[in-house]
């Protein structure tokens, strides 16, 4: 009896999950929101107007010059005991202000019990002597990919950047694709204070799925800055990062505030940096989303680690992110 009740729960959960995912194929455009490297998340991803050189640069393409020419970044995140993985690969051209980013998010081993029920009466429920044929329980995954090309130019004291984003998503047997652009500006007001603005998710091609469903984009506007340093003593300094944004024509339960039909978010982070050799960071990237992290740097390479959480520090709510920022000369020595 207990075993049958467990099978019933598995069947109900997996069928509801499959039907919900396939009937609401609307997750493709958020891959650039959910996939974040370790150092960025550790300061709350509050980097719209920041002077910060440890991250992949997903926030504001006008910041491209903070990413070292020829450098390669690789980031990997694991959540839910390895069920969910997120990856970032970034590279900046040696000869120009052009940067390439590749992003992946994958959910693996989602159970598919739609064809595993020995359903004698055809009601789709586990009744009487009916059973689940365990050998017919299959698995599927959800994968989201993003490719971003960024470039920037200088105009007077401003940096102006553009990002061109391609999205490809797959869920079970369905696929979707779409295109957006981002635009941003950045200005260094003095040796410590910088400010920036970014407009994200400007739709060029809506997310089109093989089901016929089309997913529209929700543009976002972010403005922020950084003070680096706020305070300095001998070889230690404290740096502050902050920004806020509006998601136009869309509200969610994760919003910090609302302005009519627009959802808003506030992000901030603090870094304690010891002579660019090691750093400790803590940040808030949204409602209930906290992270702490550290980095260790050599002359040319950086290792970042961040522990992140949403709504508590339990086993199923935390994520571990490792990010490696490598100099091109280091990579050449390996090959």
Image (cartoon, helix red, strand yellow):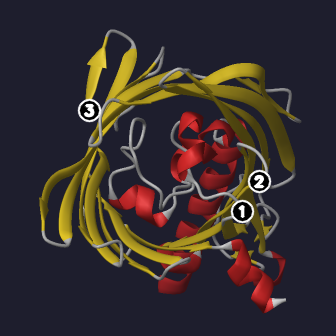
Within 10 Å of disc 3 (Cα), the crowding (few <14, some 14-19, many 20+) is some
* Disc 1, SS: loop
Give the residue number, with chain letter if any, for mark 3. Answer: 256
Q: Is residue 287 visible?
A: no
Image vertical order of residue 170 relative to residue 195, above or below: below
Where residue 148 sits, quadrant-wise, is: top right
Give the distance between the C-alpha atoms of the residues marked 3 and 2, in whole angstroms.
37 Å
First-in-chain label (1 vs 2): 1
Residue 70: give its label: 1
Q: Which of 238 and 81 is in front in this view?
A: 238
Image coordinates for residue 51, horizontal then vertical, percent: 40, 46
Q: Position of residue 286 (x, y in %)?
A: 31, 44
Q: In whole angstroms, how far apart are the C-alphas of marks 3 and 1?
A: 38 Å
Please report contact status of discs 1 and 2: CB closer than 8 Å, yes or no: yes
Q: Kindly state the secondary structure of the residue where label 3 is placed.
A: loop
Q: Residues within 10 Å of mark 1 (few under 14, many from 20)?
A: some
Frontmost residue, 226 versus 202: 226
Residue tagged 2: 93
Residue at image coords 53%, 41%: 63
Count neighbours of disc 2 (C-alpha within 10 A) and say few if under 14, some if 14 to 19, many if 20 or more: some
């Amino acid at each position: 009896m207990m075993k049958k009740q467990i099978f019933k729960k598995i069947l109900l959960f997996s069928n509801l999950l499959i039907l919900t995912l396939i009937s609401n194929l609307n997750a493709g455009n958020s891959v650039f929101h959910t996939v974040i490297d370790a150092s960025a998340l550790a300061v709350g991803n509050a980097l719209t107007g920041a002077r910060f050189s440890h991250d992949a640069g997903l926030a504001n393409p006008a910041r491209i010059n903070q990413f070292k020419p020829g450098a390669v970044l690789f980031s990997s995140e694991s959540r839910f005991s390895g069920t969910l993985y997120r990856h970032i690969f970034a590279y900046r051209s040696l000869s120009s202000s052009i940067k390439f980013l590749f992003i992946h998010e994958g959910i693996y081993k989602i159970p598919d019990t739609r064809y595993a029920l020995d359903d004698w009466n055809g009601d789709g429920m586990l009744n009487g002597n009916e059973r689940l044929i365990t050998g017919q329980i299959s698995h599927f995954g959800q994968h989201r990919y993003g490719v971003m090309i960024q470039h920037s130019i200088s105009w007077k004291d401003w940096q102006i950047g553009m990002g061109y984003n391609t999205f490809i998503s797959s869920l079970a047997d369905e696929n979707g694709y779409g295109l957006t652009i981002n635009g941003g500006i950045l200005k260094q007001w003095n040796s410590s204070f910088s400010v920036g603005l970014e407009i994200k998710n400007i739709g060029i091609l809506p997310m089109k799925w093989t089901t016929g469903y089309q997913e529209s984009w929700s543009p976002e506007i972010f403005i922020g800055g950084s003070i680096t340093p706020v305070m300095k003593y001998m070889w230690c300094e404290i740096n502050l990062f902050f920004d806020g944004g509006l998601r136009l024509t869309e509200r969610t339960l994760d919003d910090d505030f609302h302005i009519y039909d627009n959802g808003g978010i506030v992000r901030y982070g603090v870094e304690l940096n010891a002579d660019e050799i090691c750093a400790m960071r803590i940040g808030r990237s949204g409602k209930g989303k906290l992270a702490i992290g550290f980095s260790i740097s050599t002359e040319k390479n950086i290792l970042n680690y961040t522990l992140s959480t949403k709504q508590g520090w339990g086993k199923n709510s935390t994520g571990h992110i490792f990010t490696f920022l490598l100099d091109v000369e280091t990579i050449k020595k390996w090959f």
